[in-house]
Structures are given as structure tokens and as C-alpha cells.
């Protein structure tokens, strides 16, 4: 079993910053891609940013220059630094990871989500 536990969401004013964290635990041999997705009310879940184990990243156009994804491979943890937040960034943010769990094979794992609310 592999679990992802997110933290760091909350309420912030427009222009403010938040930092999300997501730690993976359980039977983990390696983690390839880790990423953040978000889902706003009434909308589909969308990619925010993702990062490979080697540090290559790709970000959604809507967050370029404002959000930064990073990871600590030793801690199996991924971070999302969110600056210059806008009301349209309000959503539930989900962590995602592609995990090699040995005998369990390759797993795609999702966190439970953390709510980010940006007030105008």
C-alpha cells in the first residue's frame, strides 16, 4: 500500500502565497513522476505541474511564473510553491505519483486533496 498525504492548503488573499506539501509513504521502491492537479467547483480536474525524479518539470500555462514545483527524492515528498495567487486558483489541489512498489508493480496514487481558497 502507498499513501500520499497533502498539507498546506488554506485561505489566502489575492496576491498572497501558499506552499503545498505531499509526502508518500508505504511500500515504495521508486517514484517516477510526481505532480499536482486541481479541480475547481464545476470544472474538470486539470494538471497544475509535474516533476520527474530527475527534476524535469512542466507547468500549466495558467501558473507559469507564479507556481514552482520541487521535490525531495530522499523524503519522497513533492512541494508546490504558489505565489501571486488569484481567485481563479481556488480549487481542491491533489497530489499524484507514479510509484514502483516492488511486488505490487507500478501504481498511480492520488492524495485526498487539500483546499486552496483565494479571496479577492
Image: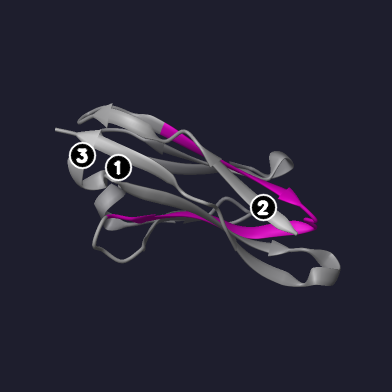
Q: CA distance from mark 3 to mark 1?
A: 13 Å
Residue receiving disc 1: 65
Residue receiving disc 3: 86
Which is more N-terminal, label 1 or label 3? 1
The structure residue drawn at horizontal position 38% and vertical position 31%, both measured from the top left corner, is 18
Q: Could you say whether the residue bearing mark 1 is in a helix, strand or loop?
A: loop
Residue receiving disc 2: 3
Q: Could you say whether the residue bearing mark 2 is in a helix, strand or loop?
A: strand
Which region is colored magenta? 19-40
Measured as percent of width and height from the top left, residue 12 is found at 28, 28
Q: CA distance from mark 2 to mark 1?
A: 30 Å
Measured as percent of width and height from the top left, residue 44 is found at 31, 66
Of all residues, the one furthest to the right in this rendering is 103
The structure residue drawn at horizontal position 73% and vertical position 41%, both measured from the top left corner, is 74
Colouring mode (rainbow / by chain / secondary structure / one colour)? one colour
Residue 100, above or below 3: below
Amino acid at each position: 500500500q502507498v499513501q500520499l498525504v497533502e498539507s498546506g492548503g488554506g485561505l489566502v488573499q489575492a496576491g498572497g502565497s501558499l506552499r503545498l506539501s505531499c509526502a508518500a509513504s508505504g511500500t515504495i521502491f521508486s517514484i517516477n513522476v510526481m505532480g499536482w492537479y486541481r479541480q475547481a467547483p464545476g470544472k474538470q480536474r486539470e494538471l497544475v505541474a509535474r516533476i520527474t525524479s530527475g527534476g524535469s518539470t512542466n507547468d500549466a500555462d495558467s501558473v507559469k511564473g507564479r507556481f514552482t514545483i520541487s521535490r525531495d527524492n530522499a523524503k519522497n515528498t513533492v512541494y508546490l510553491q504558489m505565489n501571486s495567487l488569484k481567485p481563479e486558483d481556488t480549487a481542491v489541489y491533489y497530489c499524484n505519483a507514479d510509484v514502483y512498489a516492488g511486488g505490487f508493480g507500478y501504481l498511480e496514487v492520488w492524495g485526498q486533496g487539500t483546499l486552496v481558497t483565494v479571496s479577492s
